[in-house]
Image (spheres, rainbow, N blue to C red):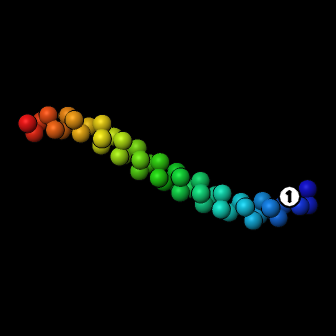
Amino acid sequence: MDQLIPIISQVGFPIVVTLYLLYRIESKLDLVVQSIQTLPERMKERT
């Protein structure tokens, strides 16, 4: 147990940062997917 606490304190911060960045990227990817899905409809409207 005594060895586990330093490992968590050393590895915990990078894990939190990684999860935060993944969450941010996921929201951006959702917008990209939505744009790609609406693209055919927009192209039909222009022709």
Residue 26, position as x, y percentages in the image: 47, 48
Helix, strand or loop at disc 1?
helix
Lateral position of residue 33 relative to residue 20, left or right: left
Residue that badge 1 annotates: 4
Q: Residue furthest right?
A: 2
Residue 41, position as x, y percentages in the image: 20, 34
Lateral position of residue 6 relative to residue 31, left or right: right
Tell me the kind of residue under disc 1: Leu
Residue 11, position as x, y percentages in the image: 72, 61
> Which residue corresponds to the image point at 65% horizontal and 62% vertical from the top-left?
14
Question: How many marks do you count on the picture?
Answer: 1
Figure quadrant of residue 1? bottom right
Residue sitting nearer the eye, 23 or 47: 47
Figure quadrant of residue 44? top left
Figure quadrant of residue 37? top left
Lateral position of residue 46 relative to residue 36, left or right: left
Q: Which quarter of the rendering shows the C terminus? A: top left
Residue sitting nearer the eye, 19 or 40: 40
Circle 1 residues within 10 Å: few <14, some 14–19, many ≥20 = few
> Which residue corresponds to the image point at 59% horizontal and 53% vertical from the top-left?
19
Residue 46, placed above or below residue 3: above
Residue 17, position as x, y percentages in the image: 60, 60
Q: Residue furthest left?
A: 47
> Which residue corresponds to the image point at 91% horizontal and 61% vertical from the top-left?
2
